[in-house]
Image (tube, helix red, strand yellow):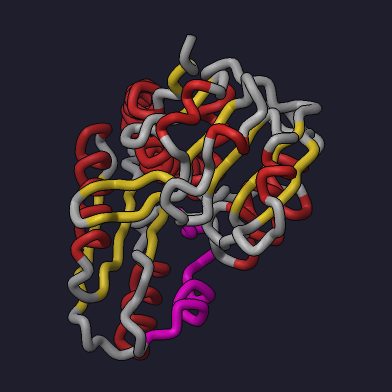
Amino acid sequence: MGAAILDGAAIAAAIRAELAEEVASLEQVGVTPGLGTILVGDNPASASYVRLKHQDCEEIGIRSFGEHLREDTTQDRLLKLIAEYNANPDIDAFLVQLPLPKQLDELQSLLAVDPEKDVDGLHPVNLGRLVMGNLGPIACTPAGIVELLVRHGVEIEGKHVVIIGRGLTIGRPLANLLALKREHANAAVTVVHTGVQDLGALTRQADILVAAAGAPGLVKPDMVKPGAAVVGAGVTMDGKKVISDVEESVAEVAGWITPRIGGVGPMTRAMLLKNTVLAASKRRS
């Protein structure tokens, strides 16, 4: 029997429905959550991601604000726009879409965002809060992965989670989140990467395996513990085709697995909406 599907599209739809009710309740007291986006340049993937975020906002009643700056935008122009978003009372949370063109400083840009409006949860203040267990906005993909597992009944507490990838957006914040002594966490967490010798010897120990390396087909069936939950969070584009870090044949061994499309991606977008609604509730309370 094949693995059960960790259906991110279905769970994300349910979360959007729940958030739509929360937005309607906020509107009854005169509060309409607002999400802002800043897109720089002409990266087609980035433009697509931003467009989807605005569509999600429209679906559940969140106001969205977007600025698209030219590819040759200066750091000063970007920082000025970030300051305007920080000061705009109609924008509860916003993001600077990454990657930025090479002439721009990503770290300086992220640091300029008001931590309370940091919808991506990637500001150093919010990452520090995560490490301390005093949670502010949580990075969207890690939060989405946890929510995906929880809503499918995959037990996390006391389990061994192996994360392939140590990046800022997934690997490191997810490891810190799952290691916290709290509900839907409290796991033993091992972080590995593609430079580790005999990677399979480590991944085969995982009750939950998260692949976030951006290495197509990295995880093969012989690297997976039978019955494990396998989450393919890393993807690579081959033309217009999305290639997961996890080979599809892993479904023959795993107990749960994310699909190549409709797994983690929709959950990331849903958590972005959730962070926006939470920011609106917090800032207007």
Which range is magenta? 104-119
Residue 231 appears at what percent x and percent y? 52, 35
Give the prevailing secondary structure in the magenta stretch.
Answer: helix
Residue 40 appears at what percent x and percent y? 26, 74
Residue at 70%, 61% in the rendered image = 128
Q: Is residue 276 left or right of residue 190?
A: left
Q: Is residue 20 left or right of residue 182?
A: left
Q: Is residue 240 left or right of residue 157?
A: left
Residue at 35%, 85% in the rendered image = 102
Residue 223 seen anywhere in this rendered image of the structure: yes
Compared with residue 242, is residue 95 higher up or lower down, i.e. above or below? below
Residue 109 appears at what percent x and percent y? 45, 77
Q: How many marks?
A: 0
Residue at 23%, 47% in the rendered image = 241
Q: Residue furthest top?
A: 1
Pick the front one: 46 or 191: 191
Whether 254 is among the magenta residues is: no
